[in-house]
Every structure is written in C-alpha cells, then in structure tokens.
Image: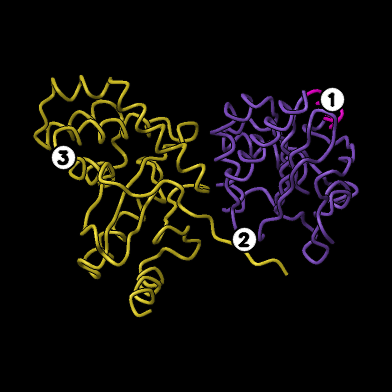
Amino acid sequence: MRTYLHPQLKIPVTRADHAQGPEDAPITVVEYGDYQCPYCGQAYPIVKRLQKALGDKLRFVFRNFPLSQIHPDALEAAKVAEAAAHQGKFWELHDALYEDQDNLHMDGLLFKAEDAGLHLDRLNKDWASSAIEERISNDFEGGLRSGVNGTPTFFVNGERYDGDWSYGPFLEYLQGLLEK
Amino acid sequence: MTILQPGAKAPDFSLPSTPDQKVSLSEFRGRNVILVFYPADWSPVCGDQLALYNEILPIFHKHNAEMIAISVDGVWCHLAYSHDRKYRITLLSDFEPKGAVAKAYGAFREAEGTSERALFLIDAEGVVRWSYLSPVGVNPGADGILEALESLASSQTSEK
C-alpha cells in the first residue's frame, strides 16, 4: 500500500505576506482564497473564531487564488485588497469583501474602499499597477505548485490540510498540534 | 488493479462527447494529452478539481497539451454538468460498455462501478509518460501535472 504524502507549501511565508499573529507562533495557517468563492465566505468566520480561540498561538496568512473563470469578480476584488495593502489596510478590505460577497461589482468595491478610508487617487493608481497583478499571479502560481486544488485550500505548518475545516474539527486538529 | 505506468502505450479509445459526436485519443497525435479519470459528475471534489483545471487550461495549452476528462456518466449528464459549471474541458462518457476505457487504463473501481481519480500524461506519440492515482476522496490539484509536463519538455529538448 502506497502511503499518501500531503502536498507541501512550496513558497515559504515571508514578511511580504499578509499575516496576522506573531511570526514565532507555533501554528501557521496559510489560506489560498478567492473573494467570490462561497466556500471561502464560509471559511471566513471560522478562521476568525480560530484566531480568537488560539490567540497568539496562531499566525494566519492569506494568499490570492482567484478562480476567474467561475468567479468573474474575484480578480478585481483581489486587486482592491492588494491595493489597500499599500495603504496599510489589507485586512480591512479582506474582511469587508468576505463580509459582503454579494457586492463585489465595481461600485461595491469602491464603496468598501471609501468606507475603509482609503485615498482613492492612490488606490486607483495601485489597483491598475502591474505590480499588483504580478503579486496575485505569483500567489496563484505558487499555490498551483504547492498543490492548491480549489478554494479555500489551507496549509498548516507547511502541509496541505485535507481534513474537515468546519470550526470544531479544524480547532481540534490545531489544538492537537499544540499538544505534540 | 494498478494504473498504467510510464512507458506503456496509451490504449486508444473513441467515446462520445455529445449525443452525436465522438472523440478519439488518436485525434490528438502530435500533441500531449492530459487524461483525467474522475468518479462522477456533480460530486463536490471533482467539481473543484475540474474547476481548477478549467481555470488553468491556458497553462496546459502552453505546454502543447490538451485535457480530456472521463467518467462513467452519460452524455446528457456531462452536457448539463459542463453547461452548469461553464467548463471548456472536453468531458467524455465511458458509459457503454461501462468503464471500458477506465479498465483499459487500470483505473476502474469494480465495487463502486466508477473510475478512479487518476491522471495520465500521454505524449505526442501516444505513450504514457506519467501517471498518478489519487485517493478517491482527495482532489489531486495540478502540481503533479505541471511537473510532469515540464519534465517531458526537458526530456524532449535533451533528445533533440
């Protein structure tokens, strides 16, 4: 019988990543997500609850994996969040997008940007920049190489997590790692 | 049953893609073919798997590779499924005699009556160059396919 090896995260987490939680946290969860994906929308509050439950034991990293063929607004939404990062407001936009996935059309995105207090001139310039497009496609390609197979895909301490990511089972799994 | 291994000649087949059209493997001679066996239309894991491949078809095309996905579902089921998901991948129906092509590739699950979740890279001469059997409940992603395409490209460059 062949043993099954979980795919490994090929692109290590660096300071260039969007991360919440301490760098030396014992657990790092990396999510590859798509802002228009309903399953990522379901995962969003679960991740928030995990962060609350695990506190500084958990570092959470978000990377882009927009499936534009099935989610036509996902790429622009990802761009707006990345452009917000240039003004230090990545997580504000990340959260606003997941909290209101029904309004990811252009006006919805602009409204969220305004609401977060972003400077719109700067935002529009960054939004259209090739740097942001590259960052998103680098996230995507790195994800493909690491075995991202849909959205959301989670990596826990560098290994793809193929288990149940609903709150109870995911928390139990992560707590199990802390006890090791 | 083990799946066909690298070096094997890929068995030719001709299966319906629509009620009145058939697609044969031999039509793709001269191009690489990524053959995807999956257990069933509509099941959530396959959905993700094909959605991912659908998204990155341009990357496969850059490697001179076409993708064909095969399950034992009927053509009408395939049509409804690819219409609903807006897939551009060719879905073929290994319906009658059921699973015959999956069996030829060693990728049929007798107990369930469905194909395995298996991937094959077939080169331009119709030879299997890479194959992978995934646990049936696990979406294998695209990393293995991309690595296989790259190593195929580099071996072809070195042969020249």
Task: Identify which amino acid the numbered label 2 is placed on.
Answer: Gly
- Please tell me the numbered disc located at residue B27: 1
Image point (50%, 47%), residue name: A146
Q: Nearer the viewer, residue A53 or A167?
A: A53
| Residue B25 vertical position relative to residue B4 in the rendered view, above or below | above
Q: Horizontal placement of B45 versus A86: left or right?
A: right
1 and 2 marks on the same chain = yes
Image mark 3: chain: A
3 and 1 marks on the same chain = no
Image mark 2: chain: B
Verify CB contact (< 8 Å) between mark 2 and mark 3: no
Q: What stretch is highlighted in magenta?
A: B20-30
Q: Name the residue under label 2.
A: B137
Q: Horizontal placement of A31 versus A25: left or right?
A: right
2 and 3 marks on the same chain = no
Verify CB contact (< 8 Å) between mark 1 and mark 2: no
Task: Identify which amino acid the numbered label 3 is placed on.
Answer: Lys
Residue B39 makes an appearance in the image: no
Q: Which of A118 and A175 is in front in this view?
A: A175
Q: Horizontal placement of B19 versus B67: left or right?
A: right
Q: Which colour scheme is used?
A: by chain
Q: Residue A140 falls in which quadrant of the image?
A: top left
- Between circles 2 and 3, the one closer to the viewer is 3
The local crowd at label 3, few if under 14, some if 14 to 19, many if 20 or more residues have their Cα within 10 Å, is some
Q: The purple chain is which one?
A: B
The local crowd at label 1, few if under 14, some if 14 to 19, many if 20 or more residues have their Cα within 10 Å, is few
Q: Position of residue B139 (x, y in %)?
A: 59, 53
Q: Which chain is yellow?
A: A
Q: Is residue B25 magenta?
A: yes
Secondary structure at badge 3 equals loop
Q: Where is residue B129 in the image (x, y as percent from the top left)?
A: 77, 40
Earlier-in-chain disc, 1 versus 2: 1
